[in-house]
Amino acid sequence: MPQQLSREVLNKILQSESIDGLSVPQIVEQFLAEEQLARFLPDGVCQMDPRDGALTIYNSTRARRPHDYAPPLPGEAENKACPVCEGNTTGVIDVANLSEGFTFINKNLFPILYPLNRVDAKHLQAIEYDDPSPDRRTPYGLHFLQWTSSLHDNDWQNMPLNDRVTVLERLAALEAKLLFGSGSEKVMPPSAVSDDGKKSCGFVSIIKNYGLLVGGSLSHGHQQIAFCNVMPRRFYHNWRFLTERGELFSNFMLRENSDNLLIRDYGPAVLLVPYFMKRPYNMLLIIKDMAKKYLCELTPLEIEAVAEGWHDAIRAILEIMPRIGKETAYNVTTHNGPGAGLYFEFLPYTQETGGFEHLGLWVCQNNPRNAASGLRKILRYVED
């Protein structure tokens, strides 16, 4: 039997079948009522590097996260039990059936963010600074996990299309709830106004970490979702690109990126290697409709294209990294909101970061044309 979270165990931690019937303040209350989180609260401090505006959020307790990527210590079992499959995790607030098992969303036990009314409370383990920076600010919000499948070994690379679409639909539903849902304005300040006058609140960041080298702690496939009052720096860069150049970054890339860097065209979206590739086999998945800024705005056909793009990019990474002698590890980031259009970045850890890179001078051990050609060949190989 494959390791998995059973329905019977799920029912013990199930608080809500669907987020659709919850308001954002009700979701906040569920975070506040989660007793386990009290042991792992963030420090409640965010600092900005005055040189480039990079933001750092502090949570000292995340050093205590369980890890199952690392080799076992002397005396430890070779195959570590998965806490998620055993149900040793926080309350579940959304679940959807898949062809096999289910996908579900819960609260991150080691959050980088927490609701404002507890961030300011005296019992929060805040760091005390003798000389507070003028750039010091208080980050607050909510930090979720979406487990791609209740089956431990199922993830984007090996799940059928319909299941991947379901996962994206629930991810989009959470994004929509946080940005535009009832009561969002009571939790977060406004962040943007769309062409139709619809206001969004806060910023929703969606990422995926896989592997110990890039911040992953548990191998059970998952995405992280952060709802925050602070704009991530990449979001700002996308917005700045629009204000300085008068066009969306996505539109610029579709026009300027060479055709020989295209990996695959899905109709509503394209997977490509950017001409400015910083590390071998970096990829972008770009939605062609520039009116779309969020997952929750996509049509069914666009959702399918994203599901196929994630599937192909991750399959290629899992195949390539062992071939080049690298431990498999990658990040996926979602670029949504003003200035971006909508695109996803796939960042395999194919090359270490050196000193020149810390000065902003990137040296890449491959070139974009070779990388794109190699990725196309890999995808043909895994499909044969």
Image (cartoon, grey):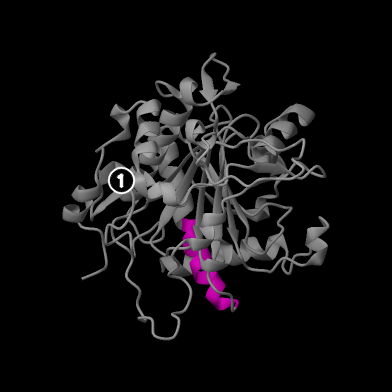
Count of marks overlaid on the render:
1
Residue 179, x across and y down, in percent: 48, 28
Q: Residue furthest top?
A: 197
Residue 331, x across and y down, in percent: 55, 57
Q: Is residue 216 visible?
A: no
Which secondary structure lies at badge 1? loop
As rendered, which of 150 and 228 lies closer to the eye? 228
Q: Which residue lies furthest to the left in this view?
A: 8
> What residue type is disc 1 on?
Gly
Image height of 352 relative to 173, above or below: below
Instruction: Please indicate whether residue 350 sits to the left or right of residue 289 in the image.
Output: right
Q: Check if residue 163 falls in the magenta segment.
A: no
* Image quadrant in which the C terminus is located: bottom left
Residue 364, quarter of the rendered image: bottom right
Magenta residues, start to end: 312-324
Q: Residue placed at 32% from the left, 63% from the top?
A: 152
Residue 208, x across and y down, in percent: 50, 53
* Image quadrant in which the N terminus is located: bottom left
Neighbor class of circle 1 (other Cα within 10 Å; few <14, some 14-19, many 20+) is many
Image height of 349 relative to 114, above or below: below
Residue 238, quarter of the rendered image: top right
Q: Residue placed at 20% from the left, 50% from the top?
A: 12
Q: Residue placed at 43% from the left, 80% from the top?
A: 72
